[in-house]
Image (spheres, rainbow, N blue to C red):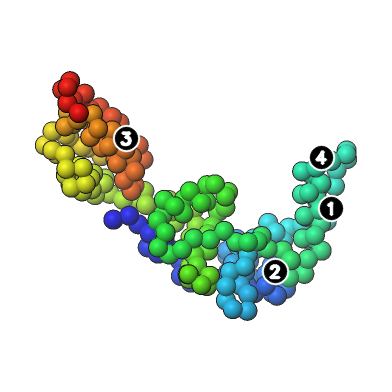
Amino acid sequence: MKTTVRDIMTTRVATVHASTPFKDMAVRFRRERVSAFPVLDDDGKVVGIVSEGDLLPKETPNPRSPVRTPGLDEQILYLRDQKKAEAGAAADLMTEPAVTVGPDDSVDHAARVMYLRRVKRLPVVDADGALVGIISRADVLSVFDRPDEQIGKEIYDDVVGNELQADPTRLTITVRDGIVTLTGTPDSVAHRHAIVSCARHAEGVVGVRDRLDDPVPGQP
């Protein structure tokens, strides 16, 4: 069974309200030893994320002041930082809308969202948009703590034997440090491709070494 976001999320989350003043957030970042806060509205719904980096322009006015004529991207960044330097509350500093996931989403999905959206953490929200937890990159990477024996058993019993209805006695599956090595002769070419694909997508797998022999010619 795939690990879900619910299995790895932290449920005690430090948050701020959209109206929380700059100074309060600066104090809480240090006191609570976090690097970002989900920002909530009056209904407890996540409306954005404010990070330590969002507060830095206040300490460094004109942080992108160029000595040459800036390009369009630089001008946009400069104006954004100027706005943040002048901001006084979370609503003015936060990144919005917040990139979120649901508690029943798979960890694989959460990892893809983090990678594609270039974010370090994801608030977890229910169907109504209310905050129920948060996950970080470290939480997502925790699936690689899975024991090698457990990975091998899943591939051998559940994937090869049950899902694919292949003959598991024709194969040898070894796992070391999350790397799966497949040897033997699968029932068919189709099964070979399916077994390799399933092994690659098994939770906790770092890599797959395909050492399988080609099936007997003429088989489907």
For label 3, the crowd category at 10 Å Cα-Cα, with few meaning under 14, some 14 to 19 and many 20 or more, is some
Disc 4/disc 3 C-alpha distance (Å): 45 Å
Q: Regarding mark 1 in the picture, which secondary structure is present there?
A: loop
Give the residue drawn at x 88%, y 38%. 68
The residue labelled by disc 4 is 71
- Given this view, does label 4 or label 1 mark the residue nearer the observer? 4
**Label at residue 208:** 3
Q: Regarding mark 4 in the picture, which secondary structure is present there?
A: loop
Relative image position of residue 32 (x, y in whole percent): 58, 69
Give the mark nearest the N terminus, 4 or 3: 4
- Given this view, does label 4 or label 3 mark the residue nearer the observer? 4
At label 3, which amino acid type do we have? Answer: Val
Nearest the eye: 134 or 71: 71
Nearest the eye: 170 or 220: 220
At label 2, which amino acid type do we have? Answer: Ala
Give the mark nearest the N terminus, 4 or 2: 4
For label 4, the crowd category at 10 Å Cα-Cα, with few meaning under 14, some 14 to 19 and many 20 or more, is few
**Label at residue 62:** 1
Task: Please state if 21 lies on the left or on the right of 219 as rendered.
Answer: right
Query: What is the quadrant of residue 212 in the picture?
Result: top left
Relative image position of residue 218 (x, y in whole percent): 17, 22
Disc 4/disc 1 C-alpha distance (Å): 16 Å
Query: What is the quadrant of residue 41 in the picture?
Result: bottom right
- Given this view, does label 4 or label 2 mark the residue nearer the observer? 4
Residue 212 visible from this viewpoint: yes
Relative image position of residue 143 (x, y in whole percent): 37, 52
